[in-house]
Every structure is written in C-alpha cells, then in structure tokens.
Amino acid sequence: MLKLIQVTLAALLLVIAPFSFADQEQHFNQINMQATASDNIANDQLIAILVVQETGNDPATLANKVNTKMAQIIAKADRFNDIKHQTINYNSRPIYKNGAIKSWQVSQNIRLKSQDFEQLGKLVSQANKLSRVQSMNFGVSDQQIEKTQDRLTEQAIKKFRHKAAIIAKQFGKSNYHLVHINIGNNHVQPQRHMTRSSMAMESKADVAPALSAGTNKISVNINGTIELF
C-alpha cells in the first residue's frame, strides 16, 4: 500500500513540475520600466466663489436678506452668456455666548466659472456690494485637459517604445513584447489667485480685480513590463 502511495505521488510530481517550470519561464527576461510626458498649459478657466452672509437676531429675516442678495447676483450673472453659475453651501447657524444663543448667521455661496476672465472680473466687481469674494482659482478646462492628455499619451507611448528598444539592444536581444502596461495622468489643482485679505481690499471698490492666469502642469505616466527575446 505504501509503495502504491509513493508511486502515485511521484506521478503527480511529474505532472505538476512542467507547469511550475513553465510558470518560472514566464518571468525570464522581464523588465519593469516607465516613461513620462508632461507640459505646462496656460490656464484657460477661472472659478470664483462668492459668499453672501448676514448676521442678526432673527434667522428668518436673515434668510430673506441672503435670498434677496443672491437673487440679485444671479440676475447679474444671467446677463453674461459666457459665465456659468451655481449656488452652493447654504448655511444657517446660531452664534453662542456663555452657553446661550447670542445671534444667528446665515450664508450662501455661489460658484462662478468662465473662460472669459474679463467678463468674470466685471461680474465679481458688480457683486462687490452684495457679497465678498471667498476665493478665485485658475485652472485648465475639461476640454483642454482631455485634448492635452491625448497629445501627451502619444508622446509617452513613443518614449516608452523608444526606451524599450534601447534596453533590448543593450541586453543583446533583437526584440521585446509587452507583458502589461498602465497609463495614468495627473494635473496640478487650480492655483489660488488671491489671498483672502487682498480679496477683501479689492471688494471695497467697484473695480475688477487684476488677474494673471499662469500655467498648469499636465502629465501622462506609463508604467509597464516588457519581456526581451
């Protein structure tokens, strides 16, 4: 009986061994490598966040004031065809002192987005008496990001193939094939244009703020494994 078990185990090992060797052979001559293509793209989009805020004792009255001012800002924004707007972050909260409610604060934000910096600057200046600027950020539009990423993907793939051919040659191999590849992209978040203190000073006057768009870095990264033969 023992001899029969030994023979059976030996037979199983003979069957399994070729698969083990084959699995090991799959990893011969494999090299991990990467290639990157990047470019600094001019920011073509401006996003401004305005806040309307009222403080007092009656939350209902404060809500009406905020709603009235926000409606006026929206009416102004509707006059600009190239500016998109969206109200966000409505908030009503009590302000405490010594454990008791002293007053109330009601606020609401509106997000303004446009690729026409001059028009958005005019709208911000017109809304100065109704709100204050919370932030102004430059960025690259979705259309420009997609267009740039397509171009950079082509460049990164060419770099990857060129580098793979060099590696194959230096190792004395005539060619290579891809085992697997990952393509990813990255771009820096929109940059802050003005600090809150400088925006507060700008908002006191009914003038458009000075704007400088700057650039935004977009990258495409390729990571993969090649096998030389």
Image: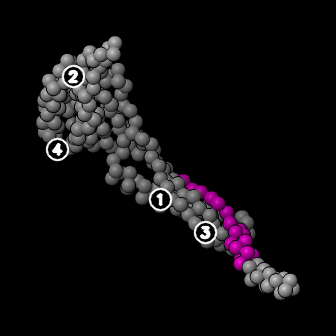
- Note whether 72 is above or below 186 in the view shown: above
Q: Is residue 28 magenta?
A: yes
Taking the view exactly as shown, the residue that stands out farthest to the top is 98
Provide residue 201's location: percent of width, then percent of height: 29, 19
Label 2 close to label 1 by CB (< 8 Å): no
For marks 2 and 3, the one nearer the N-term is 2
* Rendered image: mark on residue 179: 3
Label 4: which residue?
Answer: 81
Q: Which of marks 1 and 3 is in front?
A: 3
Q: Which of 8 and 109 is in front in this view?
A: 8
How far is mark 2 from mark 3, CA to CA?
A: 62 Å
Label 1: which residue?
Answer: 153
How far is mark 4 from mark 1, CA to CA?
A: 34 Å
Provide residue 140's location: percent of width, then percent of height: 36, 45
Residue occupying the point 35% across, 35% down: 137
Label 2: which residue?
Answer: 54
Residue type at tag 4: Asn
Provide residue 36's location: percent of width, then percent of height: 54, 53
How far is mark 3 from mark 4, CA to CA?
A: 51 Å
For marks 4 and 2, the one nearer the N-term is 2
Residue type at tag 3: Val
Residue 160 seen in this snapshot? yes
- Disc 1: CA contacts within 10 A as few (<14), some (14-19) or many (>=20): many
Q: What stretch is highlighted in magenta?
A: 19-36
Residue type at tag 1: Thr
For marks 3 and 4, the one nearer the N-term is 4
Give the quarter of the image for residue 120. Answer: top left
How far is mark 4 from mark 2, CA to CA?
A: 29 Å
